[in-house]
Amino acid sequence: MKAFRLEELEAERAANDGAYLRFLRERHMSVGLYALDKGAADPQQPHGQDEVYFVVSGRGTLTVGDESTQVARGSVVYVPAGVPHRFSHISEDLRVMVVFSPPER
C-alpha cells in the first residue's frame, strides 16, 4: 500500500519551489499535486494523457477547449488528452490533485 498525507505533499512541493509535485507513478497512471496561488497565471500546455482534476482547496475557473467552469473544493473535471486547458481567475489559492492516464512522462 502507498498512502499520502496532503500536508506532507504540500510541504514537499513547496520545499522544491515548484507548482507541481508528482508523488505517484505506476504502470497505468500517475498522480500529482498542482498548486496555483491567488492571481497566478497557469502556464500549462496540452498533455498527451487524459487527466482528472480534483480540487482539494481554493477557487478559480478552468477552461477546457471552448468550455469554462467555476471550480472549488470538491470539483472534479475530466480533460481529454491533447485538449488545451488552463486555470484562470484564481480567487483563492488552488490545490489540485491531478491523475494522468497513462502516466505522465
Image (spheres, rainbow, N blue to C red):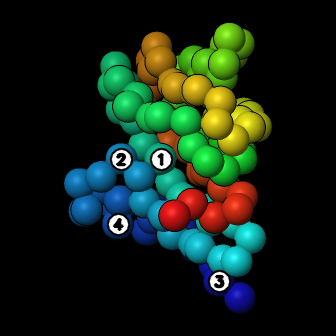
Mark 2, Cα crowd under 10 Å, few <14 / some 14-19 / many 20+, is some
Instruction: Specify whether residue 26 is in view.
Output: yes
Q: Secondary structure at mark 4?
A: helix
Mark 4, Cα crowd under 10 Å, few <14 / some 14-19 / many 20+, is some
The residue at which mark 4 appears reads as: 12
Quadrant assignment, res 55: top right
Q: Secondary structure at mark 2?
A: loop
Q: What amino acid is at disc 4?
A: Glu
- Residue at 66 percent across and 77 percent down: it is 26
The residue at which mark 1 appears reads as: 34
Circle nearer the viewer, 2 or 3? 2
* Circle 2/circle 1 CB separation < 8 Å: yes
The residues bearing labels 1 and 3 have C-alpha atoms spaced at a distance of: 19 Å
The residue at which mark 2 appears reads as: 19
Quadrant assignment, res 3: bottom right
* Marked residue nearer the N-terminal end (2 or 3): 3
Q: Nearer the viewer, residue 75 or 64?
A: 64
The residues bearing labels 2 and 3 have C-alpha atoms spaced at a distance of: 23 Å
Q: Secondary structure at mark 1?
A: strand
* Marked residue nearer the N-terminal end (1 or 4): 4
